[in-house]
């Protein structure tokens, strides 16, 4: 084999190797103390700090029995394609930029359809939703789950003695704005966090 042929075979092998690599998701960082929730959002790395709290047993019906709310926020830059016009004034704290919440999730191991969580929602902004925040607390762009199926959340560990929750999620949410077709697709979501009362 000549040197020229070897070079072409090496280049050809390199092309095959590059094309065979997975491009499904960016590398998602592992969970740690500062980020106890990770996922990919529209094929980009996304993570945040989540807090899980028990739903008050005073809520009527099955929606209040043995359930929890999961609220996640972060200070990541706004995702490309999702940010719309926002107020230019920030009256601190300005660090929080995004949130994702799941409301009234059953506090038991199992996989739950997002549509079933939305049946317990009191308004369209509750249930499962994602939003972009300005000024640390003002929502200027929000995304909600709409029918048909919008995804799921799976509880893989629900230790109510040690107050530890672990699980996975995949959900697709659409913009609430009538003049926007933007979609927030969360994939390969993982969480591991404490449960507060």
Image: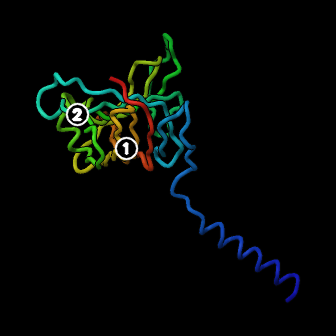
Label 2: how many residues lie within 10 Å, few (<14), some (14-19) or many (20+)?
some
Q: Position of residue 158 (x, y in %)?
A: 34, 40
Colour pattern:
rainbow
Which of 50/96 is in front?
Answer: 50
> Quadrant where the N terminus lies?
bottom right
Q: Which residue is mark 2?
A: 66
Task: Find residue 167 and report its horizontal and vertical position in percent.
Answer: 39, 44
Label at residue 157: 1
Where 197 sits versus 91, above or below?
A: below
| C-alpha distance separating marks 1 and 2 | 14 Å
Which residue does the image show at 77% across and 76% down from the upper left?
A: 10
Asked which secondary structure carries label 1, the reply is strand
Q: Residue furthest right?
A: 3
Q: Is residue 92 above or below residue 73?
A: above
Name the residue nearer the viewer: 134 or 47.
47
How far across and down, in percent of the image, does residue 20 sit? 59, 69
Residue 115 appears left or right of 85: left
Residue drawn at (23%, 39%) of the image: 117
Sequence order check, earlier mark of 1 and 2: 2
Q: Position of residue 166 (x, y in %)?
A: 40, 41
Mark yes or no: residue 84 visible. no
Q: Residue at x 39, y 32 (%)?
A: 162
Is residue 94 visible in this depiction of the protein?
Answer: yes
- Residue drawn where x is 33% and y is 37% of the image: 175
């Amino acid at each position: 084999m000549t040197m020229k042929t070897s070079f072409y075979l090496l280049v050809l092998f390199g092309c095959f190797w590059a094309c065979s690599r997975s491009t499904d998701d960016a590398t998602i960082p592992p969970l740690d103390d500062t980020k106890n929730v990770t996922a990919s959002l529209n094929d980009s790395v996304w993570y945040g700090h989540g807090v899980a709290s028990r739903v008050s047993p005073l809520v009527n019906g099955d929606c209040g029995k043995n359930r929890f709310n999961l609220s996640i926020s972060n200070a990541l830059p706004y995702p490309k394609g999702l940010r719309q016009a926002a107020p230019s004034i920030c009256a601190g704290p300005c660090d929080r930029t995004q949130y994702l919440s799941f409301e009234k999730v059953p506090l038991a191991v199992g996989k739950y359809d997002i549509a079933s969580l939305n049946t317990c929602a009191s308004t369209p902004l509750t249930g499962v939703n994602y939003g972009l925040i300005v000024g640390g607390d003002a929502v200027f762009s929000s995304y909600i789950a709409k029918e048909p199926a919008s995804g799921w959340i799976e509880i893989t560990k629900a230790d109510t003695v040690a107050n530890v929750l672990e699980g996975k999620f995949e959900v697709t949410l659409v913009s609430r704005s009538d003049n926007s077709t933007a979609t927030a697709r969360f994939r390969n979501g993982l969480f591991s966090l404490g449960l507060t009362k």
